[in-house]
Amino acid sequence: MKRMTLLVMLLAGLFATSLATTTFEAQAQNAEWTLKYQCLNPKFINIEKVVTVPDPENPDLPKIEVRQEKYWYQVIYLKNPTEEKITVPFESLLLVDSVDTVEDPDSGDEIDVSNLMPAFKGEKPNYIVNEKTGNRLVIPGTAHKPVYDSVVHNKIIEDLRIKPIQTHKYKKCYNNGVIVTKPLEKYENHLDLVKPFEAEQVRQFLLVFKDLDPGFDRLVYRYSGLTNKYEFKTEEDKLTGKGSKRILRLTYTRPGDEYDTEDVNPEPADLFHITSPEWILEPIR
């Protein structure tokens, strides 16, 4: 009987400890936090890739070609500022040649589209309707998601190690506090962001984009998941999850076609100009 009583007490103690640990972790995850971030200026790299293309003279056997492909990439650093493990719903999108307003040709009205998404590359355009005229106006620009190709990823890392980013670029980049002043050993990609951040962990990510319009003048990076602070108008909205999330938007512009010069890649920050870094609100979906 004593053994049974002791066993019951032991199980109860283990359950209480487990429950307390689970509750504590839930509280830590629900506590408000904002990641430390450090976003280096975008760069590009040309990579030779072997591809297969249709052969008109022999449809059953494709030809092999070596092509130069241009990839734009950005190195960012993220740090968990808390003393607990957290899951970060981070996502990055790149908008190319988006605009702040569009003009209705019939009324001359300027419609604000600065917080709206253009269509993704290769998809039908997105529209906004001018309520005064009923006209559907195209939202200019193209949206891009990060891509992952192991060959490209490794080539960029190899290039970064041969031509390391200068120390002052770490300090002059956009950040909410300098995290590092030199590269870390491991470069992760956007797919690794599903892995939780350990307490006070610093991680280095390589965000890669391709098929950008070579003549672009404006890049807008949108980063969501840097904070778990949401905005709700009412308590009911909070209970139903009907609110807004915060997105950091960094806009880079370049004058004319300066990126077509040969010396751009060694010093891209001299040609990039950050304008209007700001937090915007977007409905929770």
Image (tube, rainbow, N blue to C red):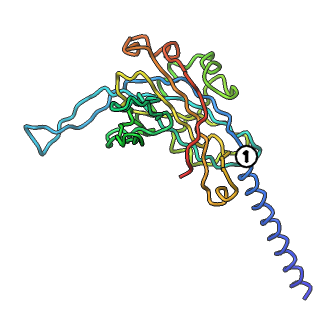
Side of 12 where 242 appears, left or right: left
Q: Quadrant of residue 234?
A: bottom right
Front in this rendered view, residue 197 or 280? 280
Q: Quadrant of residue 137?
A: top left
Is residue 198 shown left or right of residue 104? right
Q: Name the residue at 35% across, 23% down.
A: 214
Nearer to us in this view, 202 or 41? 41
Residue 201 picture location, percent across and down: 69, 39
Q: Position of residue 15 (x, y in %)?
A: 80, 71
**In the displayed image of the protein, which residue is found farthest to the left?**
57
Residue type highlighted by circle 1: Glu
- Residue for badge 1: 32
Q: Is residue 83 left or right of residue 212?
A: right
Depicted 221 relative to depicted 239: above or below: above
| Residue 193 in the image, given as x and y percentages of width and height | 56, 44
Density class for disc 1 (Cα within 10 Å; few <14, some 14-19, many ≥20) is few
Residue nearest the viewer, comparing 160 with 112: 112
The residue at 86%/85% (across/down) is 4
